[in-house]
Amino acid sequence: MATGRRKDMEQVGEFSRRRLILAGTVLVIGIVCLFCLLELLLWAAGVESIAQRRRALFEAKAASKSTLTRSDTLGWAPRPSPPDVMASAAPDLPFSNRISSLGFRGEEISQEKPEGMLRILCLGDSCTYGAMVSEMDAYPGVLERLLATQLKPRQVEVINGGVVGYSSLQALLSLEEKGFALSPDIVTICACYNDAGTIPGAMVVDDRDYLPNKTDAELYGFWPQLATKWKIRLGASRVFSLLDRAITSLFESLHEPSNNRESGTEPKRRRVGIPEYEANLTKLADECRERGIEVVMMSLSLPDEYAAAMRRTAEATGVTFIDTEPVLAEQCALMAEIGRKEDVEARADSEEQMGQTNQRLLQAQKWMFEQDSRRKLSHEILLTHTDSALFLDPCHPTPLGYRIIAELMAKTMFDRDLLKK
């Protein structure tokens, strides 16, 4: 009797499992049929898929004249120059923007490093790229010539990995995406000016303004990159594309700041906060050291708290730190004194006027050198640098400013014994 009941229960269980499997199969088939029907209806209605938008964007890129192009992982990246531009562009002209096929400013380079060559990769923003100066006058170009002279007959190659508008996170992602493949011996990083603010308003990518009011974590963090990968894989589906648009619109409306909705103006946000900035630099240093690559972190006209964060990170990770501001401040004071003296001498009417001017110069010099000897305050230095012989604007050096920076970098590399054969 018990055996019969057991058999009955087993038959009931088997019947339930079969019903469950059948129901699941019908459900899956139904979902697939519904999905196909929706795809057909959306196709008939002319709804554009992500893949179609990407193809249209690619075609627009081909016709675009801007020097920056969209990048799924980096936001934007330098657009490689056509062969005729690479052949004809003069490297000594300020607005000559030769971009190699690998996406670096300057002449073509091989991805594989020649044996015995010293290869240095300079990462950063427009100050590394050399905005408004020629590729030869930007500090990577000057550094290459200095080291090539001092290390003869060894081959030296300094790659300009700076990109206009880049933050520390973009520099790190660029290193991971294509920098390590170059097998550099030394990696330098000079990025922070953009971390402290929003994406520059002058950014033009594929002939369009690039002005998202988001932090770098929201734009290029782990989850955005994961979402981008899935969009690429599922981008041919119109249903997925429609869902993506709906979810994105809903998310943006829910997270839109209230003051932005009320006033119609975008609040100022830091692209990369101090903790994230230190984390980016730490990760860059750790990944380089794991591969036996030396790291140099350089502070160049950075907001004070970010420069201090860079110094702390360099000390914590045991890498080289260069603070350019004391040297630039000293040179700036000297240039200002020379310029003012020449101006006064040209139009002075009396010795009394000359004496008064010299007195003011001495007071200004004394004030500058009474500042912290380890670090001059950025905003004060920037005020001094503006329209001077060393800076074209509050953050971009002149060719002379770049030469001073490159000389300091070369000296530091020799002093720290980073240029090993």
Image: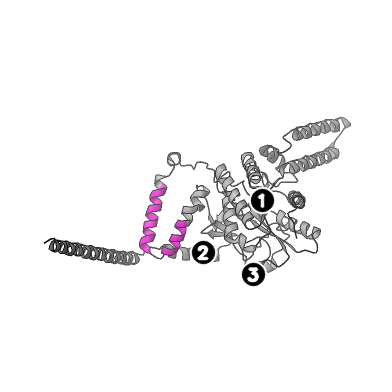
The residue tagged 3 is 83
Give the overall secondary structure of the magenta segment: helix
Q: Is residue 45 left or right of residue 139?
A: left
Which disc number belongs to residue 60?
Answer: 2
In the image, which residues are magenta? 226-252
What is the distance, in whole Å, between disc 3 and disc 1 at their CAs? 26 Å
| Residue at image point 66% right, 51% down | 127
Disc 1 residue type?
Cys
- Disc 2 and disc 1: Cα gap in Å? 28 Å
In-image side of 339 versus 160 (left or right): right
Q: Secondary structure at mark 2?
A: helix
Near mark 1 (Cα within 10 A), the count class, few <14, some 14-19 or many ≥20, is many
Picture quadrant where residue 233 is located = bottom left
Q: Earlier in the sequence, mark 3 or mark 2?
A: 2
Instruction: Write down the residue under mark 1.
Output: 127
**Of the numbered discs in the image, which one, if any, rests on residue 416?**
none
Neighbour tally class for label 3: few under 14, some 14-19, many 20 plus, Cα within 10 Å = few
